[in-house]
Structure formats: structure tokens, C-alpha cells
Amino acid sequence: MGVLALLAAIVLVPLGREYADLRRSFRLTRMGAFATTALVVPAFAVATVLSQPLAAHPPAQWCAIVVATFAIYSLATRAIVASASSAETAPSRNTRG
């Protein structure tokens, strides 16, 4: 049980910081920041599928899962942050006087 708690802390603490940073730095709403942070779940799923050829070598498979999850999640969050940043500087589409 202690190992699971340690692993949960290792994963959840950085995600909590990421959530807070998205709220503070990019002014995302609670739901937007949560949804962006939650992208780690599908990133992990994709990484797990991509690492299946390494199933015979569990240490290599887990290493590949961690690296691929980090890469996929980073690409997804950068795209969202870039989109949010460009939306702040885009001209208003409000046509009501």
C-alpha cells in the first residue's frame, strides 16, 4: 500500500502543479485546466499501446511508456497553451456594438 501511495504522490503532485500553472499563467478556467491536465490519461493509454512490442522486456516497456506519455502529453499541452495564448491576442469577434 505504501508503494502505491508513493507512486500516486509522484504522479499527482506534478499534475497538481501543472493544473495551478495553467490556471495562473494562461488564465484557463477550472474546467479548461482540469481537461488539459487530464490529457495525461489518454497519453498514457496511447503510450501503453505503442510499447506493446516491448512486452517481453518489462523494464524497457515501462521506460518506453513513461517517455512516450511525457512526450505525447507535452505536445498536447503545448498545442492547447499556444491556442489559448493566440486567442488572447486575436481581434474580438464580437459584432454587437
Image (cartoon, helix red, strand yellow):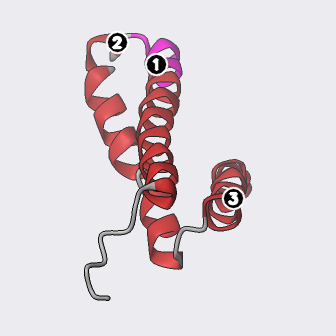
Question: Which x, y percent locates residue 60?
Answer: 49, 12
Quadrant housing the N terminus: bottom right
Q: Secondary structure at mark 3?
A: helix
Please state which of residues 6 and 31 is positioned toward the viewer in this rendering.
31
Determine the residue positioned at 63% across, 55% down: 15
Query: Between marks 3 and 2, how big is the CA–CA gap?
Result: 38 Å
Query: Between marks 1 and 2, how big is the CA–CA gap?
Result: 8 Å
Q: Which residue position holds label 2?
A: 54
Give the quarter of the image for residue 22: bottom right
Q: Kindly identify the amino acid type of the residue bearing the numbered disc 2.
A: Leu
Question: Which x, y percent locates residue 12?
Answer: 65, 57
Of all residues shown, which one is farthest toward the bottom? 97
Decide whether the magenta segment is chiefly helix, strand or loop: helix
Question: Which x, y percent locates residue 19?
Answer: 62, 62
Q: Which residue position holds label 1?
A: 64
Instruction: Tell me, yes or no, if residue 26 can be seen here.
Output: yes
Please state which of residues 24 and 31 is positioned toward the viewer in this rendering.
24
Tell me the number on the disc at residue 15.
Answer: none
Q: Secondary structure at mark 2?
A: helix
In the rendered view, tell whether residue 62 sits above or below residue 19: above
- Inspect the magenta stretch and tell me whether residue 12 lies in it: no
Q: Which residue position holds label 3?
A: 25
Q: Callout 2: few (<14), some (14-19), or many (20+) C-alpha neighbours within 10 Å?
A: some
Q: Kindly identify the amino acid type of the residue bearing the numbered disc 1.
A: Ala
Quadrant housing the C terminus: bottom left
Q: Secondary structure at mark 1?
A: helix
Q: Is residue 51 left or right of residue 9?
A: left
Contact? badges 1 and 2 (CB < 8 Å): yes
